[in-house]
Amino acid sequence: MDSADFDAQEEKARAKLSPGAYAFAAAGADDEITLADNIAAWRRLRLRPRVLNDITSIDTGVSVLGMRLKTPIMVAPFGRHKLFHPEGERATARGAAAAGAVFILPTTSTVSIEDVAVEPATAPRWFQLYLPPARALTENLIDRAAAAGFRAVVLTVDQPVYGSSPRAARSPLAPSPDIRNANLPGQPIAQNSYQADYSGRVTFPATWRDLEWLVRRSPIDVLVKGVLRGDDAMRCVEAGAKAIIVSNHGGRHLDATLATADALQEIAAAVAGKSALYVDGGIRRGTDIVKAIALGARAVLVARPVIWGLALDGSQGVRAVLDHLRVELVRSMALCGAARLDEIGGDLVTRSNGL
Ligand SMILES: Cc1cc2nc3c(=O)[nH]c(=O)nc-3n(C[C@H](O)[C@H](O)[C@H](O)COP(=O)(O)O)c2cc1C
């Protein structure tokens, strides 16, 4: 990887990947309004830096679910890493571990939970869960994840049905036979995670009762990913979720939702410190991370830039993307007069850009 510019990396990855794999990663739902607005909404915010603070030593360390981590940047769950690199999730897990970042393994992994767990065994890792209709399948997945050392289950709740993406439909996936759903034996990989026609089939039919069941049944902490409203976030906390991930799934399913940068403040106000908040969607700069923390997030998740890094250079590429974002974060903190993440408060950010 010779460029830290994510747009340039995307172009290189595009040239390397099959059209189907590229479109699977890059596309958003329908008119891609949310896909674009996730990035634009961080850019609309302005920083109010403090001066003359002692910033000779910057610390990006953060406490997450009782773990002390060196970085608040995590790898968001995204499916089917072998579409992007032959080593698949193993490479991504290794790159994340090298950067000290949490890696979230997707249900639709192309490498098994157990094979990812050794990359290396001590790294901080969570397991993303879709609730399949069969409880036995869910129990099998969460018990295996817990036994393999994963510290949390991340329940994704914003995709009860598939969204539709004209862009992805123009370039369908044509996965080779060795790209399989490694955690769900016997299940072929879907041709796409989008669906052109609405069939009415509820793919992941989770309800509040299922969340309560999962919290009771899971041997490890449960987080909920895909929340965009304060009232829903509070209800998740009341149901026992240990943390909330503010997310619109990278604009991949419901288009025209709030951008996550615009949803975060309402959710932080509603939750009022009763639960940790994480956020993803369009995080591309160190300044975006400062803004996210200022608006109430403890840490951020990143997907697409990590995919481009994985496609270009496997685990090294993943590490380079995460390290690059962390360096940008350190510089942004120094320029904002914040030496530690807990010095990044709401006063550092404003929606008013003077225009
Ligand atoms: C190719 C791709 C596959 C994804 N698959 C999943 C998934 O299986 N489960 C999930 O919770 N989120 C999934 N996501 C959403 C990401 O976890 C994350 O919410 C979003 O992509 C973050 O936005 P960003 O790509 O702008 O960083 C996927 C995203 C992409 C790009």
Image: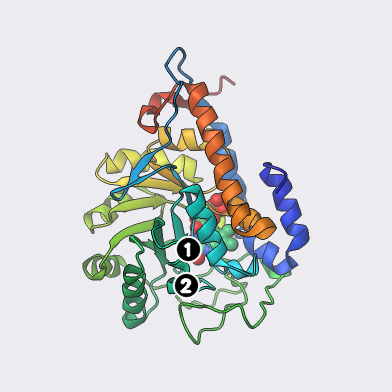
Question: Mark 2 and mark 1: span between their CA atoms?
Answer: 8 Å
Q: Is residue 44 left or right of residue 273?
A: right
At x 60%, y 47%, the residue is 320
Is residue 193 shown above or below 222?
below
Query: Where's residue 193, x and y in %?
Result: 57, 70
Sort mark 1 into few (<14), some (14-19) or many (20+) by Cα contacts within 10 Å.
some
Query: Where's residue 325, x and y in %?
Result: 56, 41
Query: Does the CB distance between marks 2 and 1 fall below 8 Å?
Result: yes
Query: Where's residue 54, x and y in %?
Result: 42, 17
At x 35%, y 58%, the residue is 224
Q: Is residue 27 left or right of residue 61?
A: right
Which label was assigned to residue 119?
A: 1
Three-letter amino acid code at the position of disc 1 = Glu
- Mark 2 residue CB less than 8 A from any atom of ligand 1: no
Which label was assigned to residue 115?
A: 2
Q: From the viewer's side, name the closer residue of 331 and 189.
A: 331
At x 27%, y 39%, the residue is 272
Is residue 201 shown above or below 290?
below
